[in-house]
Image: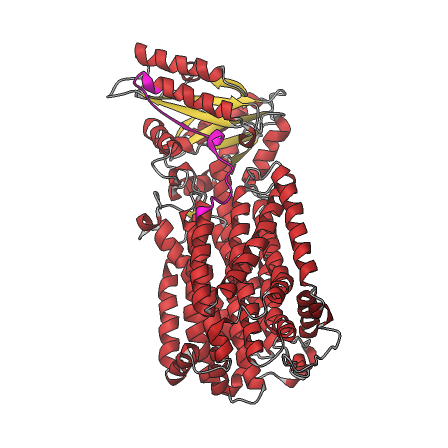
């Protein structure tokens, strides 16, 4: 692989003009297609094989058209100062607002609260439900404006009015501020690392180009594939992070090869052949881990994983082709003054840190493991769910509408359970439905049951059961389990069956499914890590150590997420308005991403250690040599990723905020505690045993040249020496191509 990538790097360097034009053409093509495409969708969260999904599918089958795709809005009216909304003046204000809402564009109908029974028992609160003819993404500005105008009119008459519902869900992609924060910090880190404006700017330029290709590609495919706005943001997040890092590794190796006396073209080829090989392997691990999310069985998670994997794949291609092409335009500018004056490698902070760890391996190892273990303890209380409007800022009207409804109608009103009764074949379907509804209504924790709605055949009915607790309360989860667990007694003698569905039940089912899949998926990812590292480093103990370190870092990062977002410690500092369950998809998605990032650092660090060991240095000196060459670059890469991920904590979406914080914490712990401390400590304790591999296994494993051993025997190409390993190689360069 190193030889192939070496040739690819030299080709891109020689044909730099064509390479840049190809990438520019690709960017323009996807940009034109993406900007003219409908964009991303709402992305319904569904999962085949769970009860709530079966019940939802039954409703669609028996009630054609009932599960409409049109947006809805809830306009909540609260009477002032202890008054009732049923008072003459307040009622008139509500009715005027309802009439204005009914006359708005794209409105299919409005449910008057006084005729639909949408008034609280104490009379303080009422709500009107507005149904639209189109989905939220297709609502026009006039339709949204009419909703705001009607609410403002009621406010002017003394009522407190808030709005919620899917009609207010803005299909927002990356906001821009998050990306700018990450890029600004990355620029500073790159400038400090390289000491050259050109070397600092090139990774940013190539990463932005790759992320733009991915962004427009997701926009282009968003509507036909049902990709969500969260997918767009995650693709941008990963595209920027790995794009900067992969370019950083290639440019750093190019500078090193130039310092060894190679010509610019030869240095570019060797950089892509060595660091590029590690980039391919690291990117492949991320792609496999993200694509592997499809085994969980949640369509939206599969789509997010595949889209993010595509963004990583684009970043790899950019590092292998666009980076060496740009190096061809300014081959000396990326070196910096210091590198030109003193190209030889000297003692640095990386080697000094390695020597420190080698002198105290036991203390460093024990401290690192105990520290990560302590951070991982909160994972034992992990509670998964899908926070809704209650997780939004209190400055939003959606959150205030949620709170007003909970205050007026009870906390369970915002998450009713939908009961679907299949009485087909029952002697008296209506009596069977009435019996089941009555028995469910008597369950402890159910405060009310709505009248049933029957299908045309009169054999299937749907009604709502309102819990006494909020949708994300653990007691609601137990209530769903209880109702389902007592199914035989509830159905007894009716000849009918029932299923529990609705948004609340669906979120509970998905959380249970994901939590059950988390350990198997983690085991699969760890097993994959062991196999891949076994092939790359041809060692038994190094992959085991890497896998255990990954488990420690991801559990510790997940523990921090639980501490902040579930238990509320430091939540205010991150702008988290309401604590609650951790997003159902977040842990398993984080495992997939962190696995790839952890392997990035493992490969880039240990490939240089193994390279020194293979060249004859003893085990301890090889660690020092490896850290001398790679520690500074790995630290810079980690700081850049932390900056990019941390910037997304400022996003409004709960999923993105959690993922941004979780990934930033995971990179911090994995890079600085596991890879920079625990890894050299373990290598120091193992010594030569770290690189032991049974002969029979050595014969079975394929040989993958990550360190570029095949390039070590190529003749040296010195600038100005008048020759190159391929005499034709510099012809295009001399011709100005």
Q: Quadrant of the N terminus?
A: bottom right
Residue 537 highlighted magenta (yes or no): no
- 124 lies left or right of 168: left
Q: Is residue 168 above or below residue 557?
A: above
Q: Tell me: 714 left or right of 472.
A: right
**Extreme residue toward the left, this view:** 81
Where residue 564 appears, x then y in whole percent? 35, 52
**Residue 553: percent from left, percent from top:** 44, 65
Q: Tell me where the magenta segment starts and ends, as one range.
A: 155-177
Residue with the most extreme front position:
735
Residue 455 position within the rendered picture, expressed as x and y whole percent measured from the top left: 60, 22
Q: Position of residue 608 (x, y in %)?
A: 54, 78
Question: Foreground residue, 16 or 599?
Answer: 16
Residue 722's image quarter? bottom right
Residue 158 lies in magenta, yes or no?
A: yes
Front-most of residues 271 and 260:
260
Query: Can you say whether 604 is above or below 655 in the image?
Result: below
Q: Is residue 239 above or below residue 507?
A: below
Q: Residue at x 53, y 23 (%)?
A: 132
């Amino acid at each position: 692989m190193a030889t192939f990538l070496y040739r690819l790097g030299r080709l891109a360097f020689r044909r730099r003009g064509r390479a840049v034009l190809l990438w520019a053409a690709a960017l323009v093509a996807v940009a034109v297609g993406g900007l003219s495409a409908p964009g991303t969708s709402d992305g319904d969260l569904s999962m085949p094989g769970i009860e709530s999904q079966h019940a939802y599918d039954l409703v669609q089958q028996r009630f054609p058209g009932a599960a409409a795709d049109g947006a809805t809005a809830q306009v909540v009216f609260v009477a002032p100062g202890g008054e009732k909304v049923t008072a003459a003046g307040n009622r008139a204000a509500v009715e005027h607002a309802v009439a204005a809402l009914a006359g708005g564009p794209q409105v299919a109908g409005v449910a008057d609260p006084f005729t639909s029974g949408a008034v609280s028992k104490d009379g303080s609160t009422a709500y009107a439900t507005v149904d639209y003819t189109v989905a939220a993404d297709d609502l026009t500005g006039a339709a949204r404006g009419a909703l705001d105008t009607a609410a403002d009119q009621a406010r002017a008459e003394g009522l407190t009015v808030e709005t919620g519902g899917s009609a207010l869900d803005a299909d927002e992609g990356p906001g821009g501020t998050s990306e700018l924060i990450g890029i600004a910090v990355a620029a500073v880190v790159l400038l400090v690392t390289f000491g050259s404006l050109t070397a600092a700017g090139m990774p940013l330029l190539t990463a932005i180009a790759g992320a733009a290709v991915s962004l427009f590609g997701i926009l282009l495919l968003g509507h036909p594939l049902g990709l969500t706005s969260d997918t767009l943001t995650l693709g941008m997040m990963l595209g920027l992070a790995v794009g900067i890092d992969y370019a950083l590794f290639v440019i750093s190796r190019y500078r090193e090869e130039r310092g060894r006396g190679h010509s610019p073209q030869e240095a570019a080829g060797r950089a892509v052949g060595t660091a590029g090989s590690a980039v391919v392997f690291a990117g492949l691990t991320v792609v496999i881990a993200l694509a592997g999310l499809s085994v969980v069985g949640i369509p939206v998670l599969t789509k997010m994983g595949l889209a993010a994997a595509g963004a990583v794949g684009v970043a790899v291609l950019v590092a292998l082709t666009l980076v060496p092409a740009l190096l061809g335009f300014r081959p000396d500018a990326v070196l910096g003054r210091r590198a030109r004056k003193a190209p030889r490698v000297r003692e640095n902070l990386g080697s000094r840190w390695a020597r420190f760890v080698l002198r105290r391996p036991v203390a460093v190892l024990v401290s690192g493991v105990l520290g990560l273990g302590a951070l991982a303890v909160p994972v034992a209380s992990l509670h998964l769910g899908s926070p809704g409007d209650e997780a939004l800022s209190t400055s939003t009207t959606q959150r205030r509408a949620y709170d007003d409804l909970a205050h007026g109608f009870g906390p369970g009103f915002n998450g009713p359970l939908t009961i679907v009764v299949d009485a087909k074949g029952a002697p008296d379907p209506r009596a069977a439905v009435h019996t089941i509804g009555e028995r469910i209504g008597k369950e402890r924790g159910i405060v009310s049951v709505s009248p049933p709605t029957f299908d045309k055949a009169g054999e299937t009915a749907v009604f709502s059961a309102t819990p006494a607790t909020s949708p994300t309360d653990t007691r609601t989860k137990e209530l769903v389990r209880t109702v389902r667990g007592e199914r035989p007694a509830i159905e007894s003698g009716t000849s009918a069956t029932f299923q529990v569905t609705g948004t609340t039940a669906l979120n509970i089912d998905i959380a249970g499914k994901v939590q059950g899949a988390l350990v198997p998926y983690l085991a699969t990812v760890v097993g994959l890590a062991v196999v891949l590292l076994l092939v790359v480093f041809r060692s038994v103990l190094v992959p085991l150590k890497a896998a255990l370190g990954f488990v420690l870092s991801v559990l510790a990062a997940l523990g921090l997420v639980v501490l902040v977002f579930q238990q509320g410690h430091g939540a205010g500092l991150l702008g988290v308005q309401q604590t609650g369950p951790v997003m159902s998809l977040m842990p398993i998605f984080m495992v997939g991403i962190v696995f790839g990032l952890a392997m990035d650092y493992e490969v880039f660090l240990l490939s240089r250690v193994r390279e020194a060991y293979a060249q004859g240095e003893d085990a301890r000196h090889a660690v020092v040599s490896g850290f001398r060459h790679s520690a500074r670059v790995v630290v810079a890469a980690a700081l850049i990723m932390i900056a990019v991920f941390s910037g997304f904590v400022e996003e409004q979406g709960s999923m993105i905020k959690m993922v941004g914080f979780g990934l930033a914490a995971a990179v911090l712990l994995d890079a600085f505690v596991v890879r920079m401390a625990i890894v050299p400590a373990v290598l120091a304790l193992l010594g030569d045993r770290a690189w032991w591999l049974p002969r029979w296994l050595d014969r079975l494993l394929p040989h993958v040249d990550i360190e570029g051993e095949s390039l070590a025997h190529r003749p040296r190409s010195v600038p100005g020496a008048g020759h190159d390993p391929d005499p034709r190689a510099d012809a295009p360069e001399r011709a100005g191509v």
